[in-house]
Image (cartoon, rainbow, N blue to C red):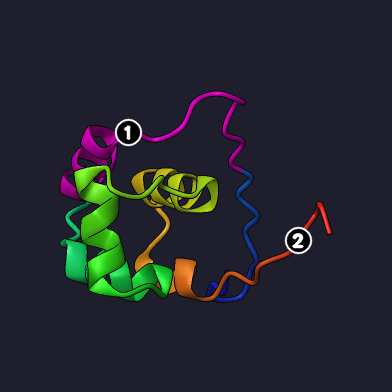
Amino acid sequence: MKTSGSEKLMIIRIPDGEALTPDGFRNLLEEIGLSQHEAARVFGVTVRTARRWARGDLPIPDKVHALLIAMKQGASPEDIEDIETIDLEG
């Protein structure tokens, strides 16, 4: 995450078994002020995928859940786009 002159580290942990529901996904988008189109751009997926998450046709990845929480806590979409993915399990 790039900031002006200083770096911030935000760690979001999603407890096991607490998957984001479609209602929760839609509510977080509304709280943050993102449309499904904007969410698709931020998360690097198609609009169809974001819509399928919102309908419950596809499970919402934990990473998306964590990034939405980070945005709710003040991270901007630009901050989220700058995050590099680190695979801790691979």
Disc 1 designates what residue? 21
The answer to whether 38 appears left or right of 69 in the picture is left
In-front residue for pair 19/57: 57
Residue 19 image offset from top left, x and y in percent: 46, 32
The answer to whether 90 appears left or right of 47 in the picture is right
Q: What element carries label 2?
A: loop
What segment is highlighted magenta in the picture?
12-30
Q: What residue type is labelled 2?
A: Asp
Residue occupying image coordinates x 47% and y 69%: 79
Residue 72 among those drawn in magenta: no
Residue occupying image coordinates x 55% and y 23%: 17
Residue 20 among those drawn in magenta: yes
In-front residue for pair 43/77: 43
Q: What residue type is labelled 1?
A: Thr
User: Which image quarter is the N terminus in?
Assistant: bottom right
The answer to whether 48 appears left or right of 75 in the picture is left
